Image (tube, grey):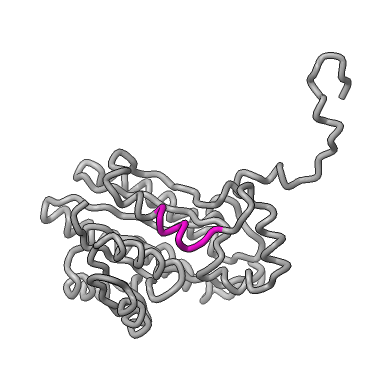
Amino acid sequence: MTARAVLVTGAAGGLGAAIAARFAAGGDRVGLLDLDGEAARRTACDLPGEAVGLTGSVSDPASVEVVLDEFGTPDVVVNNAGIVRFGPLTDLDLTDWHSVLDVNLTGTFVVARAVARRWLRAGTAGVVVNVTSMNGVAPGPNAGAYGATKAAVALLTQQMALEWGAAGIRVNAVAPGLIDGGMSAPIYADTATRDARASKVPIGRLGTPGDVAEAVWWLSSDASAYVTGQQLLVDGGVTMAMIANLPRPGSVDGVGHPGVRP
């Protein structure tokens, strides 16, 4: 695969930094966009090849245009920027609600729209990969607006794929599960919580930022050339394991067999 220009948002640390590192390792020119531009530049300095830290707000169209003028029109956009404001919905401040929507949902839209407009004007194709979450598939307690925004991004991904597909633009999403890193790092600092959660994952371990980065890279590559409008769960199977994690008496294993009464 020839080298590409790749823009990753929210890339100063966590999942974004891991995603940027995967593209850099593959020989791509990578732009690491973050509100904390200084941190993005420090992260970029540690990457191989050509990587640059960029300062900008994903929810501000003017800021995004400045970034695109500086970096150039990318071939691949990874919308990873996201924030959380945890707490019960009844206690959720409306300012926090709007903040999460602005970054997670509006920011994804603003960046993807700005780049798609450039692709459409130039008559070129590109790839968008949006980072959603298992919390957009199954809600978690006290997650505030987070799960709602990620569910919305999943549908927005389909909308983008539908409207831009004729131009050769592919749009997909990656939904991380229980990932040991990024915004979830404080959760897994507690050993008991870490072990308990890992035990509920069908493949027996927590995910890593690298697991997510590999999925993003695959969706950006020619190996997935006929895939668009999809959300790929990178969760070790935990989202589908609800019934497996509920109590179940062994006596039911014979139900349905001849001669066995329920």
Which SS type dominates the magenta stretch? helix
Residue that appears at 26% across and 63% down: 6
The one nearer the camera, 176 or 114, is 176
> Quarter holding the C terminus?
top right
Q: Residue at x 35, y 76 (%)?
A: 34
**Residue at left 55%, top 62%?**
179
Whether residue 115 is situated above or below residue 154 in the rendered picture? below
Is residue 71 one of those drawn in magenta?
Answer: no
**Horizontal arrangement in the rendering, residue 242 relative to residue 177 (left or right):** right
Of residues 168 and 105, the one nearer the viewer is: 168
Foreground pick, 15 / 143: 15
Q: Please tell me how many numbered marks the rendered image carries.
A: 0
Residue 28 image-quadrant placement? bottom left
- x 53%, y 64%: residue: 146
Q: Is residue 226 at all visible to an observer of this figure?
A: yes
User: Could you tell whether 122 is left or right of 226 in the image?
Assistant: left
Q: Residue furthest top?
A: 258
Of residue 25 and residue 237, the one placed in the foreground of this image is 25
**Start-end of magenta stretch:** 207-215
In the displayed structure image, the side of residue 18 where residue 205 appears, left or right = right
Left or right: where 184 falls relative to 23: right
* Extreme residue toward the bottom, this view: 38
Q: Position of residue 66 (x, y in %)?
A: 21, 75
Q: Position of residue 209 (x, y in %)?
A: 47, 63
Q: Is 213 contained in the magenta span?
A: yes
Q: Position of residue 58 (x, y in %)?
A: 34, 71
Whether residue 61 is visible here, answered yes or no, is no
Compared with residue 118, is residue 166 higher up or lower down, i.e. above or below? Answer: above
Q: Position of residue 261 (x, y in %)?
A: 88, 21
